Every structure is written in C-alpha cells, then in structure tokens.
Image (cartoon, rainbow, N blue to C red):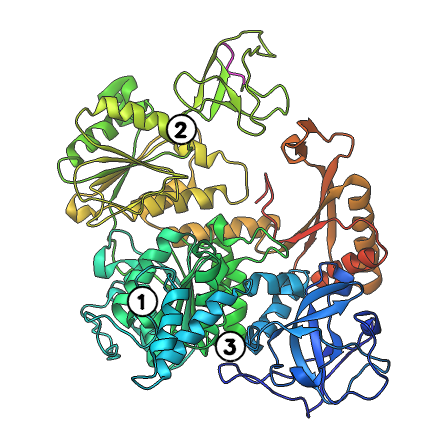
Amino acid sequence: MSEPHAPTSEQLALLREAARPQRKEPGDASTDAADAAPASSGSKPDLVAVVWPMLEVPHLDREFEYTVPEEMRADIAVGVAVKVRFKAQQITGYVVALREQAEFSGTLRPIQRVISSQVVLTPHVWELARAVAARDAGNVSDVLRLAIPPRHARAEAALDAREEKTAAPEGDVDAAGETADASNPTAADGSPGAPSDGERSESEPAEPAGAAVDEASSAWRYYGGGLSLLKHIADGEGPRASWNVAPGLFGDDAWPAAVAELADAARRSKRGSLVVVPDARDVERVLEACTALLGRDKVVRLSADQGPQARYTSFLKTVRGEADVVVGTRAAMFAPVKDLGLVVWWDDTDSLHAEPHAPYPHVRDVLRERARLSGASLVSAGPTRSAAVEAWVESGDLVAVDAVARTGPAVVVTGDDRAVERHGPAARARIPAQAWRGATDALAHGPVLVQVPRRGYVPALACARCRTKAACPVCHGPLGLADEGATPACRWCGHVAHVITCPECGAHDLRSLVVGAGRTAEELGRAFPGVPVRRSGAPDVLATVPDTPALVIATPGAEPVAENGYSAAILLDAWALLDRAGLDSSERALTHWSTAAGLVRGAADGGAVYLCGVPRHVPFPSVEALVRAAPRWFAERELAERAEVGLPPVVRMAALEGPRRAAQDVADEVSRRANDDGVPLDVLGPLPLGRRHMFDRATGRSNDDDPKVRYLVRWNDPGAPEPPKLLRGVQAARSAAREPVVTLRLDPMLDGLA
C-alpha cells in the first residue's frame, strides 16, 4: 500500500447546507483504482471523487478515485452515497473528498450513479469512523455500516414533502401535504401521531423556556457538583463527569429528568445532545422526560427497533439538524448530531452496549471518542461505576459526581446467625422468613419487586441422588424444564432427553438445580392468594406497573418502574450472580442489585431491600457495597485489584479466535512483527474453546474435527496505537494472501475472563 497523501486545497466542498465542510485528511492513492470499474477515456478528468467502497476484505479497506460524469455533478457532494464498479460488482460507497486532479496516474472509471443527493456521512462521523476503526483494529467500512442505516427512499421522499409543506405559503401546500400524509403514516420519532416539523400540539409551548434551571427544584440538587455541571454545560464548556445516580428518587427527581436537564443546558448553549441507553424501555423514559422539557419536535428517537422507515426518517432529521436531542439505544452512538455539545450514556456495564458486529465497538468508547473529537461534554451515568470509568476518574479525565446524602432503601442481608436463632432453618430458605414477613407487610403499601436471576421455569437440573449437573447427551449443554410437567430438554440444541442416566451414580431421577422466574411466580402466587402476580422478562417485558399492591417477578434488566416506587424488593439467589464465571461478575451483580434497589422507596418512606441467598463462606465486596450504598468504594477496590494482577482496564487485550492452525499462524505472525517493530506485547494461549462454542445447530454435531482455539494478545498501555495497528496489518496481509482470517476482537467479552 502506498503512503497516504493530503487532498489539494482546490477540493470542491459541495456540501449541503446541513453538513460541515470536509476536513482535510490524508487519503490513500491506491494502485488498484484502475481495477475498480470499466476504463474511461484517457483525457484528464475535470472532477474526481474519492470514494470509500463498502468492501468487507481488510486489504481493500481504503479509498479509491473515480471520475464524476457531467450529468452527476449537480448531485455529487462530499458525504453522499454512490454506486461504483469494483471488479465485476457494483458496490455502494461514500464520497469522502472531491478533487480537481487525480492522484492516480492511470485511467479512472466513472461513478455509476448517485444513490441520493442527501449527505449522509458528515465530516465528524467520517473522522469518528476512522478513529474507531483504528482503535479496534477493524475496517472503516464496517464502522460505516454501523453508523449509516440503509437508505429508505420512501422515508426520504416523505420527509422532503413534509419540509416543502412547512416551507410553502398557505394555499400552496395541498399537494405537498397529501404526499407527506400518504407516505408517512409513522412519525419521525417512530411513534404514531407525533406532530410533524413545524407543528405543535395545543398543549405544547410555542418555544421551550430556556431559562436558567431553578436550583430548588432541579433533580441535580441531590448531587455534589451537579448544579455546577449544568452551569458549565450551559456556558458552552466541555466538562466530563462520572455520575453515580442516587436510588429512591422518582418523578421529577428521577435520573431521566436529570438527563433532560443536561440536554436542556446543552440546548441553551446552542448545541445538540446525544443520549444512549441500553434498551427501549429506558429510551421511552428519557424520551418522555426530554419531550416534556424541550418539546416534541426538538427530540428524536433513534433505535434499531423502530423499523426501516421510521429509523431512516429519524436519521435524516438528525443529519439535517432538525433536532436538538437524539435519544436511542446502541444504534444511535454514531448519530450525526449537529454541533454536538453533550454525550451521555446510561449503565455502561450493560452487555447491550457492546456491539456484536465487527469491529465490536462499545458505546462507552465511541462516545468518549466523539467527545474528544468535538469538544463536547461527557457524562457517564449509572447506578454503579464500572472499572473502566473508574480508571478515567482516577486518571483525572472524569470528575466524580455523587449524591450528597443517602436516599435509598434499607438493605437487609438475610440468613445471618441472628436470623437463624430467631427463625430456625426457615431463615436460610430460598425465600427466608425475614423476607416473607417484609413482603407481607410491604404489600399493604404498594407493589413488591422480586428479582430472579434466571428466566424460564427450571433452567438447570441435577441428579436427585448425587447432585451432578444433568447434561445433554448430544452437545453436553444444560438440561432444563420449560414448564410444569415438561420433558427435560437441552437449552442449547433443543434435544429432548426422555431418559436420563446419571454418569456418576447411575440414578434416573432429577431435581431442580436452579429455579427460574416462571416457577418462582407460580410458587409465590400460591403463597399469597388474592395478590396479583405480574411477570416481566424476555420476551414480555413490562415498562411500568400500577402503584397498587402486587408481586412483580422480574429478571435482571427487566424490572418495570412503579410510579411512586416499590414498597420493598426481594433479591433472590444472590449466589447465582456471584458465581457467574467472568472478570466482571461482582461488578454486574452489584449493578443488577443496585438497579432494583433504585426502584424502591427510600428508607424514610419505609422502603426495604432483602438480599437472599448470599454464600456465607466468604465476604463479598459487592454485597458490602450494596449494604453501605458505596458503589464508588467498590469501583476503586475493583480497579486496584485488577491493577495488581494486570487485568483490563489497566491493560488492554485482544482475542484471536479460529481453527487451531490458522489461529496459531496469526499468533506467530503477531509475535514476529512485534519483535521486529519493538512493540511491547504478550501473546497468551492457546485456549481450546468449549464445546458450546463449537456445536453446529444445523447438523446436530460438534465440529471436533476442526477444533477452535483462542489466543490473547496483551499490552500494558491501553491507549497505545501501535498494537491495534499491528494486529490490523496482520489481518490485512492474510486477507491479501487469501489465507484464512481469524476473528479479531479487542476488549473481548471472554467467557471465564470478562
């Protein structure tokens, strides 16, 4: 590959009014450009487009030059999508620069067509895509696929017609209005019945107030430095904070209302905001709070579950600068917000923030990079603080914002020696006597939340005689029961095991090893006759529950919100979360418990949380942090312990996974290049992947003939750019040589490690 070059100063900046001028950045004068499409005439072209094609192979992840036909010059611009010829295929690409002179000395091929004159790749997102690809050793084209949703022509036409209707004088809008109404049955934010641009409902103010926040009623009055944070954002500055959300606050004091105040502060500085949350229920809560404060037409929802038309409409409204605030899930982390001044994410420990597609970026890292590139404010929010965020706090990159007083419920750890003296064996039952009594009393004052770590009916079975875990005879996965009276079936491959013989003692009888949410709801329904029992868990997740007496059975992450909070919460089977294999098991357990505790009324209002099933043989820092309401202490301790043994985020890791021979070749090449280039890193492994990784669901066989392994690459400086560049180079070289390319993932979520 040749060395990068800089675009000429005469580059045409044919941007639409909504987009910023293209930033001058080095490109790549590829010698493969002549192979990209059929040859044109040998004359010098007057206008050359630099296109980044959406190719999947690493060694072709670079820019190519194409000529712009005369008939397309009116529609071509930096940031538009085009179709180009590459070899024998027609490929989608994005124009990243325009030049008057080609850098390539040979003949170029013309652009086939302009998909749309709408600019979809803004300069900021283009710079961000390259930064994310460099950080995660991935392809820029893969990042662009995540950043730009597929074009929906009907959505674009409907939005254009609606804008024409808004801009047209009275009496000239009938035709445009009919077009817009007919082609846009769904509102831009994905919710039916929302007013279009330029329209407001009678209940909405003509213009958001924009006045300074009332300190006496602000949700930030509960936090040390919270009001100062608002002021700095409103003044156009770029503060960065880690915000531990106080539990037991509801209504106008809840965290969605506080996020809305942050967005309002950014709006008062004439800047946009981006808020990313894990799931659709959180999106609705934040969207409702922002809409109430800013107005409906100033807030856009952007999430993958909207549907193609609604999602692309929201994307277009964002790229055209028609919304001040974008609220969404992981799909919104690349949203092209105009004049970005604030990025906020909620609960970065949630696995939904980790992108499952290459190059596997995390919301936390993408938004941090966006704040760096744009100078925007950054707020990391959540009921706890992850070790990664704590590392930024201790480095001085973020400032801690914590509650000034304890507002949460009282936390009781059941099953201690005093409870045994009082209640006997019932004190250490699955639902101890202390929790039973607390729930009975609390039901007189409102709903009671019961958190169950496992979904399903009975997700795991064991031998009734020797307690050996029952495994599938086909794939060795766990056996479970889907319902009462059901036949044991494998949770991985679905094999129905009609006859089970214990490999240890030869017995045929089974017992439950873990009780799921379904069985728990059934048992509690019988124990509390006359009390409504509501279940919330995949796939039927409740958003809210009435503020009336009821038992609400929910799995972690699916807890519905009660308007005035739960009167009590019972957190069952604490051991199931603490015993989970993983570097972050304690961190995730504390987050799940703290999230549930945050939905319970404060101790001053009688709220209580009962933590059940804590192992008694060893103390757990996560349990202590929950009782003391000390998530900051836990994060500091967790980070210090990882630093002692050299684990992320103090160091950085990459995982190489693939067939044994290919993975070994890549690992050897990485070691060789690191030694030659003086890049300090260690290659660890190989680790054979478990059978559950290798089971082929289509054929019903384990692919033991082609075993897969995992290597880990570790380096001590998490911010060093050389190791990701080296790993990316190895992948590109193997791709060019048509050798098997193994899966490369930086900051991996490793089973048994992270």
Q: Amino acid at mark 2?
A: Gly
For disc 2, the marked residue is 516
Snapshot quadrant of residue 535: top left
The furthest residue to the bottom: 10
Q: Secondary structure at mark 1?
A: helix
The quarter in which the N terminus is drawn is: bottom right
Q: Earlier in the sequence, mark 3 or mark 1?
A: 1
For disc 3, the marked residue is 374
Relative to 410, residue 63 above or below: below
Q: Position of residue 695 (x, y in %)?
A: 66, 31
User: Does the magenta run of residues contain 466?
Assistant: yes
The Cα atoms of the two marked residues, 2 and 1, are separated by 36 Å
Snapshot quadrant of residue 537: top left
Where are the magenta residues, as a range? 464-468
Residue closest to the eye, 169 or 355: 169
The residue depicted at 30 percent of the width and 59 percent of the height is 255
For disc 1, the marked residue is 260
Q: Secondary structure at mark 2?
A: loop
The residue depicted at 60 percent of the width and 50 percent of the height is 647
Q: Amino acid at mark 3?
A: Ser
Q: Amino acid at mark 1?
A: Ala
The quarter in which the C terminus is drawn is: top right
Q: Secondary structure at mark 3?
A: helix
Relative to 565, residue 85 above or below: below
Q: Is residue 518 left or right of residue 467?
A: left
Q: Earlier in the sequence, mark 2 or mark 1?
A: 1
Q: Earlier in the sequence, mark 3 or mark 2?
A: 3
Q: Position of residue 358 (x, y in %)?
A: 63, 55
Q: Residues within 10 Å of mark 1 (few under 14, many from 20)?
A: many
The residue depicted at 40 percent of the width and 22 percent of the height is 483
The Cα atoms of the two marked residues, 3 and 1, are separated by 21 Å
